[in-house]
Amino acid sequence: MNKINKYERVYVNLTWVFILLAFIQMVIRDNFLVNAKIITLNGICSICTVIFLIAILMFNLCKIYLLKKDMFYNRPMYNLLRLLEISYILASVIIFGFQQWVYILLVFPVLIITLEMGKGKVRYFLVYSLISAVVFQGLKIYSSGGIGIGGIYFYFSTIVFLHAILFIFSELCGKIHEDNYESQQQNKMLLSELTDRYKQLEDAQKEIKNQNERLRDTNLKMEDTNRKLTESLAELYTVQQISEVINSIFDIEKLLQNVNDIIIGVMGVKYSTILMYDENKNIFKIHTTNIIDQKELMIINDNINCKILLDSLNSGKPVIENFVDPEEYPFVKNRGINSLICIPLITTPKKFDKTQNATETKKMGLVLIEHKLANAFDNNNLRLMNLIGKQVGIALENAALYERMNEIATFDNLTKIYNRLSFQKKLEEEFEAARKNNYSLSLAIFDIDHFKKFNDTYGHLFGDKVLKHIAAVIKNSLRSGEIFARFGGEEFIILFPKTDIETAAETVEELREKLEKTTIRDELVSASVTVSFGISCYPHFASSESELIKTADDALYRAKEAGRNCVKLACREKSEVL
């Protein structure tokens, strides 16, 4: 409820009290005070009083209606109501003869006007009230007649005194209004500040809420990033481990065993098996596995060459299955396998066409990991296994390349026996062992008799065939531990550990006879060959590696001087020939 309506309702209620008191006063006056001196206007006091009370009643009802419609903010109507109120209060006392205490009712319009509009506005109404009171009193005196100067002075002095009191009262109420107004303004300012603060607080709360939401989103992103980072670190660790294996192990057997162990540890699977592919036979063979149950090994060995595994290798596409059907994957029958991943091992293409596009990849095999739990793998596991598969492919390629390079560095490319450099290393090792353990070490050097004739007569290709034939015969005739190498051109060398010169001479003689009986054929060409041998021995004829080779070479020279196709032993003096 607003301030004006509140004041007006209080005033309406007081008006009801006034009407009741006025009615009681009229009844008493008309019925009990008939002989009293009552000032009337034209002898119609009772009728006018009734009419006036009815007018007040109607006026009060009108104000109730206006209050319900909230129409007191209409300024002209408000001013009119206030003027009418002042008029009927003055008329009720001065014209109609109500008791003087009714003047008290003037206090209420003055109070309400002052509280609602301030003391500046109430002065106009007080002037109007004073003028109205003077006019009404003048009419009353005029109609009554017989009133002396003293009476006139009394009436008008009373009116002036009354309005002086009302003026003082309005000034006091005006001060209250000003204080109240200032308080209201302060309250408004405070309310405005509180509203601003509340709005700021609300905005701050919204900002905090937005920041919390952003922070929550950031936390979710960070959790997702941390999860991915953890997975990436696991993948990086696995790849790093496999890379270390690749860089440190060049033996394929050992390499694949280490890779298989890493896969089992990182993936947490039940079984891991590496299958190697035989391109000529188009079949898989189990190379490395942690399956130890013989029955399971038989099942997987008998069924690994199924279509789905061969298709995976040929297409180069991995296979992931979390609900394994034994009919589709026969190698899991009766093994309790429910999830598997199959990764092809394919090396990087090395052949290129004229446009520099890769034309061929080498199919090495498959990595097959199996788990007894259903739905055990996801795309992250597949991605990690793809990385592992690529690393294993690189490992196999590097190991094969290492073996090839080692073979080139160790063996003669034509005859496939040790070359001179690798023989020299073997000689150093064996000579040191013979010296340390005090046993004999024999060495034989031989070359092909009249080898230049074969090249000149039959061509170098036939000469190469002669070299390969002799190397194969000797290699197949030697015992384990005896070292055979091509020493240069048509010259070969044999090392006999823990063998004295007599035993070595017997072996060499058998080899010479076997070669003498050999016929080498090449389409329309056929020929026989002979060789000449020179033999020496540590410690009887040499005290160092170089001396061992030199003394054997000297013996070979004597064999050639002796007519070739023979065996000569080293000697301490030139005149001594054995």
Image (spheres, helix red, strand yellow):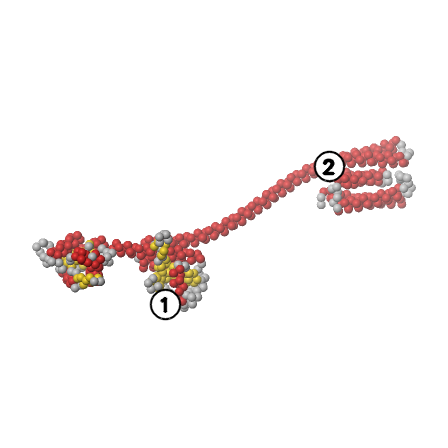
Asked which secondary structure carries label 1, the reply is helix
Q: Which mark is residue 106?
A: none
Q: Amino acid at mark 1?
A: Asp
Residue 337 in view (yes/no): yes
Which image quarter: residue 4?
Answer: top right
Which image quarter: residue 1?
Answer: top right
For disc 2, the marked residue is 118
Q: Residues within 10 Å of mark 1 (few under 14, many from 20)?
A: few
Instruction: For the C terminus, give its image quadrant.
Output: bottom left
Asked which secondary structure carries label 2, the reply is loop
Tell whether 125 sits left or right of 491.
Answer: right
Q: Residue at x 33, y 53 (%)?
A: 247
Q: Position of residue 427 (x, y in %)?
A: 20, 55
Residue 417 in view (yes/no): no
Look at the picture and state if 515 lies above or below 158.
below
Q: Residue at x 44, y 62 (%)?
A: 322
Task: Calculate the distance from the C-alpha at mark 1 to the C-alpha at mark 2.
Answer: 112 Å
Q: Position of residue 364 (x, y in %)?
A: 35, 59
- As drawn, which residue projects farthest toward the left? 575
Tell whether 22 sits left or right of 213.
Answer: right
Q: Residue at x 73, y 37 (%)?
A: 118
Q: Position of residue 375 (x, y in %)?
A: 45, 62
Look at the picture and state if 307 lies above or below 436.
below
Q: Which mark is residue 302?
A: 1
- As drawn, which residue projects farthest toward the front? 524
Q: Residues within 10 Å of mark 2 (few under 14, many from 20)?
A: many
